[in-house]
């Protein structure tokens, strides 16, 4: 549990930049954003129960996960959204294991370059790709500013 920092101007665009005036019956802008964040986590099918997301100065997430990997993926799914700079993690983990390291992708990075820097072997890129699924759809589809989880090798 703790605070995780992200680049506020990088990531998935889940809500429009412009604000329109709302009638009292419509959802507030904040509730629409919370719904979009919940939808993002839901569509990834991550096994976290009792998930709740609160939006304030940061995004606060509560819930229960079986593993740190599932917990970390929820944190990344929420943090890799444009406009989100901090995720406050309050997810309880039933079976804790060693935590992954989070790194920010820099311009010119590839998963193999990151694997070489983190593991000493560029061919270990597949471990990073698998650790970031389902957020990553292809090993070549990463972008500067994105945060990735780098798991310890077994």
Image (cartoon, rainbow, N blue to C red):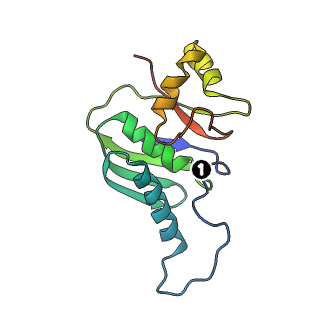
Where 48 sits versus 25, above or below?
above
Tell me where residue 131 appears, x and y as whole percent.
Answer: 46, 31
The quadrant of the rendering that contains the N terminus is: top left
Tell me where residue 61 appears, x and y as whole percent.
Answer: 41, 52
Q: Quadrant of residue 152?
A: top left
Give the side of residue 71 with respect to residue 3, left or right: left
Residue 69 or 61: which is nearer the viewer? 69
The quadrant of the rendering that contains the C terminus is: top left
Residue 148 or 134: which is nearer the viewer? 134
Residue at x 57% of width, y 19% of height: 118
Residue at x 37% of width, y 34% of height: 68
Crowd rating for badge 1 (residues with CA inside 10 Å; few <14, some 14–19, many 20+): some
Tell me where residue 39 appears, x and y as whole percent.
Answer: 44, 59
Give the side of residue 134 with respect to residue 98, left or right: right
The furthest residue to the top: 120
Q: How many marks?
A: 1
Residue at x 57% of width, y 13% of height: 121
Tell me where residue 71 appears, x and y as whole percent.
Answer: 39, 41
Name the element at disc 1. loop
Where 89 sits versus 25, above or below?
above
Residue at x 43% of width, y 48% of height: 44
The furthest residue to the right: 108
**Residue underneath mark 1:** 85
């Amino acid at each position: 549990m703790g605070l995780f920092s992200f680049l506020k101007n990088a990531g998935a665009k889940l809500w429009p930049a412009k604000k329109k005036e709302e009638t009292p019956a419509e959802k507030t802008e904040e509730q629409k954003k919370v719904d979009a964040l919940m939808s993002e986590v839901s569509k990834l099918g991550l096994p976290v129960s009792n998930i709740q997301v609160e939006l304030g100065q940061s995004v606060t997430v509560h819930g229960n996960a079986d593993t740190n990997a599932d917990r970390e993926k929820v944190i990344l799914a929420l943090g890799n959204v444009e406009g989100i700079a901090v995720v406050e993690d309050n997810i309880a983990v039933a079976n804790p294991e060693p935590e992954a390291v989070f790194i920010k992708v820099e311009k010119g990075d590839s998963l193999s370059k990151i694997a070489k820097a983190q593991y000493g072997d560029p061919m270990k890129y597949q471990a990073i790709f698998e650790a970031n699924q389902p957020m990553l759809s292809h090993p070549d589809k990463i972008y500067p500013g994105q945060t990735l989880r780098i798991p310890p090798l077994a």
